[in-house]
Image (cartoon, grey):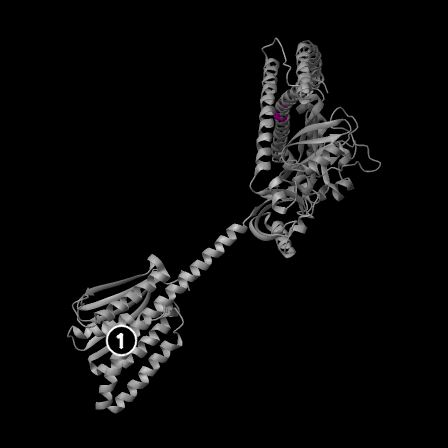
Amino acid sequence: MRLRTKLILILPTIVIAASLISSALMYLFASNELEWRAKRRLMGTAVLVAESIQLRFDTELRKFEYWAAMPLVVNTARNYKNTRLLSEFDDYFSAVVAREPYSSIYLIHKSGECVASDNPIRVYQPYCTNVVSQRPSAKAGFAGIANIGHTLMGVADDRPLVPITAPIRHQGEVLGILRAGVDMGRLSEEVLKLHTLAPKEKIYFFDSSLPAVPPEGLKLQAPTHWEQYSPPPSELQASFGKRDGSIFHYRDSKGDHLAALAQLRAPQWTMLVSQPMAEILAPVRLLEEITLVVVAVTIALLIALISMLTAPVVKRIESCREFSEDICQGRLEERLILDSHDEVGDLAHDLNQMAARLQENYRALEEAERKYRGIFENSVEGIFQTNSHGVILAANPRLAELLGVPSAEELVGESAVDFYADLILRERLLERLRLEGEVGGFDCEIIRKDGVRLQSVLHARAELDAQGAIKLIHGSLEDVTELREAEEKAERARETENLLLRTKLEMLRYQVNPHFLYNALNSLQEIIMTAPEDGVDMTRAMAGFYQACLARRSELLSTVSAEFDRIEKYLRVQKIRFEDQLETSLQMDTEAREVRIPVFIGQPVVENAINYGRRSGARPLKIRISANIVNGKCLFTVANSGIWFEPGQSGGHQTGTQLGLEYVQRCLAHHYGSKGSLEIKKEDGWVIAQIVFPAREEFRDE
């Protein structure tokens, strides 16, 4: 779709939409305002008419109460056989009926008979006795209550009448009632003629006591002008029953109507004032016609203006489009020349810049392609691309060299599966690629075309399809045969070095143990000569200690609990030697029991504590041994009472001390490096030797 066509379609559409929206808003505002005013007017009319009629009925009721108290009426009720009184009653109320809106005025005796009336025909009529005197309004009058009854239809002329009843009293006794029917025709003419209605505005009175449909054979007359009476429209009556408030809408065959109501106290009438909505909203109908004319004229002007303004713009845009097609075809040498400084001119300038940059990028791309092609061709690693079945799709010369193929071109189309020494490794590689997408440092053995085996490291990345299956594999292959051989040589050298160090430690350990054996045998000789039974115990204790030592003579590592067990056996031998001169205590945390430590690492420290603690002269010698876990470190502590002798001060056993401490320090350095230490300190008459090492540690060599 052309730009001009779009503008012709879009702009008039916007104008039409804006006009319709503004007109709709104005229509809503104006119609709401007119309806609000109509509601106020109709409600005012309904209230005014209702109040006027109510005031008139209240006045008529007071008149009847006044007449019922007149001596003429009271005497007539007392002596209704007196012809003079009856004649005066007839004359007086005939004059009243002539000037007031009453159909007839009559006196009903408490017996129910009509005994006096302005119309002699009514006197002693059975209808009065059987019907009129039985009505609720008549009964209320006999009960002494003046009232206005429900609307009735006149028997003689079928016109609506409203009965008014007043009790006739004498000395507190109700003798009868004075009753009349207010002729609604005459009353309406007197009341309604004072009100001016708008065109097509109508007033209805609604009384639930009246039939909605006239009884069969009965022609009802209208309240005014003696026209035939018709009830309010059925649609109005239906809406009246469903209304919510004093103002409501109803619809009939002529359209929507607005109605307002006001109610009387007595009679229980509802005054309805109605007016068609079409008449209420007539002033805003003209707005619709004006809007249509304005919209039509505006659209015509817009189409003409758009055609005039877009012609040169469309021409320049067409030039830009043709130039962009040249760019798409790769013709980047040409440039667009437009003598305009508007947005189209800016677009032309940007297109020229884009063409220039594309030229530069194209040259840079060619250079980058040459550069990366060189990297691909001259890489020290074999680079490849295969499909999911292992068919080689692309390869560089280095890969062909590694696989023993004359050229990369000859390698394309070969199956990479044929070069695996173990096909299980390829299946593992594919499985990892499916799960991880990329695999690095994958060790595998390949077989060249000439049968030579190479140790290699594979790096691969999988390209997956929409279903998650492998589509392509990109990767590189590195020959690590020489590196693996060098690593094996270094590993053998480390093993040789560890074996040598292990041998040295064992030799050092076996140098430490003979000192204890020599001293123990000397003590055993003395004990056997003085106390043979103690000699037997000491022999058994020594046998248990050396049995524990020989059981692990080839091991370099033990546990804290095993070390405590050997030390306890050692201390049992020493307790037999020194009896009460030696007091020992051992304490070990539960967490420290299975901590791994170098074997016999605590033995030299305990032996030194006994030997040099006894030389300090303190008796008895106290030895405290503990193993605790603190902040991830194991603290193996040996404390003895007495003082510390520096090397050279204690005399003959300096060599044993140096050998024991050297064994401990070498074990710590070998197994823990800088994380293990031996600390000796003096504190409050105690010499404390503490071995510190990690509680959870991967040993440097086991």
* Location of residue 495 in the rendering, given as x and y in whole percent from the top left corner: 44, 61
Q: Is residue 669 left or right of residue 208?
A: left
* Location of residue 416 in the rendering, given as x and y in whole percent from the top left corner: 66, 48
- In the picture, residue 157 is in which quadrant? top right
Q: Give the quarter of the figure containing the C terminus.
A: bottom left
Q: Is residue 377 left or right of residue 653?
A: right
Q: Main secondary structure of the magenta part?
A: helix
Density class for disc 1 (Cα within 10 Å; few <14, some 14-19, many ≥20) is some
* Location of residue 10 in the rendering, given as x and y in whole percent from the top left corner: 68, 20
Residue at label 1?
Answer: 515
Evaluate whether residue 416 shows in this view.
Answer: yes
133 or 283: nearer the viewer:
283
362 or 83: nearer the viewer:
362
- In the picture, residue 622 is in which quadrant? bottom left
Q: Is residue 72 magenta?
A: no
196 or 410: nearer the viewer:
410
* Location of residue 269 in the rendering, given as x and y in whole percent from the top left corner: 67, 34
x 26%, y 79%: residue: 518
Q: Give the quarter of the figure containing the N terminus.
A: top right
Q: Which residues are magenta?
A: 36-40
382 relative to 232, above or below: below
Evaluate whether residue 588 shows in this view.
Answer: no
Specify the farthest residue to the left.
617
413 or 211: nearer the viewer:
413
x 67%, y 31%: residue: 271
Q: How many marks?
A: 1
Specify the farthest residue to the right.
217
- In the picture, residue 463 is in which quadrant? top right
Of the residues shown, which amino acid type is indicated by label 1? His
